[in-house]
Amino acid sequence: MVLGVVRGAVWGARQASGLEGEKLIEVEVPGGGTKVAIDRLGAGPGDRVILAHGSRVRDLTIGESIPEKDIVIAIVDGTSLDVAQ
């Protein structure tokens, strides 16, 4: 899983079979890279999200007929870091 920030929506005139009606978003991930993921939770630009990757995650969350393996599984409201000194 990866914590990232939504940069915006991604769309195209034509999509692979199985992606009809799915919302695709661009997510900036640690290290400055980006990923395109399916979002059924309604994340918007600037939202922090947790991305999960893999066919098992996809199958359990949105269904095995979707031809994408990066899935938004949470919109993050906050984080806490407890660092022992």
Image (tube, grey):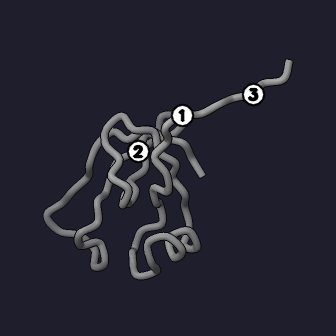
Q: Quadrant of residue 57?
A: bottom right
Q: Pinpoint residue 50: horizontal percent, then vertical percent.
A: 52, 48
Query: If you read the primary sequence from the N terminus, does the residue marked by circle 2 or circle 3 appear first?
Result: 2
Q: Secondary structure at mark 2?
A: strand
Mark 3 Cα within 10 Å, few/some/many (few <14, many 20+)?
A: few
> What residue is disc 3 on?
82
> Alpha-carbon neighbours of circle 1 within 10 Å: few (<14), some, or many (≥20)?
few
Q: Amino acid at mark 3?
A: Asp
- Looking at the rendered structure, the kind of residue marked 1 is Gly
Determine whether 9 is above or below 22 in the image: above
Q: Amino acid at mark 2?
A: Val
The image shows residue 19 at horizontal and vertical percentages of 29, 72
Q: CA distance from mark 1 to mark 3?
A: 13 Å
Circles 1 and 3: CB atoms closer than 8 Å: no
Question: What residue is pinned by disc 2?
Answer: 27
Residue 78: assigned label: 1
Label 1: state its secondary structure: loop
Outermost residue on the top side: it is 85
Name the residue at 57% across, 47% down.
Answer: 2
- Residue at far left of view: 13
